[in-house]
Structures are given as C-alpha cells and as structure tokens.
Image (cartoon, rainbow, N blue to C red):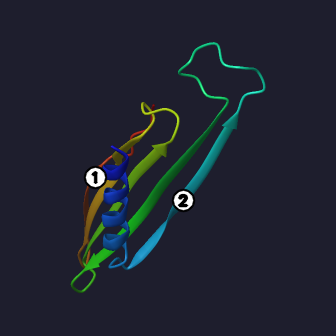
Amino acid sequence: MKHTILTLLALLLATAATAQELTGRFDLETRAFPEGALFEQQHESNLSLAFEPEVYWPVGSGAHSFTVTPFARLDLGDSERTHIDLREAYWQYVGRTWRRGSALPRCSGA
C-alpha cells in the first residue's frame, strides 16, 4: 500500500509539473503520547504526511480551463488514515459574453 501511495504521488507531481499554476499544501504531522499504550497495536508516537495540491491548466487560447485538487495522506502508524482521494475537479469555459462551468464539489470529512 505504501509503495502504491508513493507511486501515485510521483505521478501526481509529474503531472503537476506540466500545469500552468500549482498551489496547495504539504503537511507533516507528528503525535506523541506521554503515557504508555494500553494495547500492543498502539504506538507512543506517530508520523503522518499529507499533500493537497491544486493544479490549474488553461487549454488552447485559455477559453477552457481545468482545476483539479487531489489529496494524499501517508500515515506511518495508522493504515486507516493512509489514503488518496479527489477533493475537487472543475472545468470552466469562458465565452465572449457568458461563462459555463461544471464541477465535482469539494468534499470534506473523515
């Protein structure tokens, strides 16, 4: 699973390199617990990496554009938190006097 996540992140970065605009965030999270674990599966500390780029591509003369926001998390101590998903995808067309768009809305949750 970790190799798959890392491979998908590498593909995402390669795709983002061709984009017109790249913004986003990269998080490094660590957790430490002062008391000992109650169960063998619990750890005294944990490390998690998260990456949420927003990639913008204008197409042709710029009348069409795409914006995609994927998300990836790699959690070294909790495999339930390790995942990749698509947070937002948006297409827009701008004509002379009108504008049209279609989107997969931003999802927030677990």
In primary-sequence order, the first of circles 1 and 2 is: 2
* Residue 25 relative to residue 56: left or right: right
Q: Distance between the residues labelled 1 and 2?
A: 21 Å
Q: Residue 86: x and y, percent? A: 33, 49
Q: Name the residue under label 1.
A: 103
Q: Given this view, does label 1 or label 2 mark the residue nearer the observer?
A: 2
- Quarter of the figure with the N terminus: top left
- Looking at the image, residue 92 lies above or below residue 35: below
Residue beneath the point at 46% across and 46% down: 74
Where on the picture, by quarter, is residue 32? Answer: top right
86 up-or-down from 63: above or below: above
Quadrant where the C terminus is found in the figure? top left
Identify the residue at the far top of this view: 38
Query: Front-most of 4 and 13?
Result: 4
Q: Which residue is drawn at 27% across and 65% down?
A: 92
Amino acid type assigned to the residue bearing label 2 in the image: Arg
Which residue is pictured at 42% across the width and 39% down the height? 82
Location of residue 17 in the rendering, given as x and y in whole percent from the top left corner:
37, 77
Q: In which quarter of the image is residue 45?
A: top right
Q: Quadrant of residue 19?
A: bottom left
Of the pair 86 and 42, the residue shown nearer to us? 42
Kindly check if marks 1 and 2 are in contact, taking CB atoms under 8 A apart as contact: no
Mark 1 closeness class: few <14, some 14–19, many ≥20 residues within 10 Å: few
Q: Is mark 2 on a helix, strand or loop?
A: strand
Instruction: Give the image location of residue 16, x and y in percent.
Output: 36, 71
The residue that mark 2 highlights is: 25
- How many marks the image carries: the answer is 2
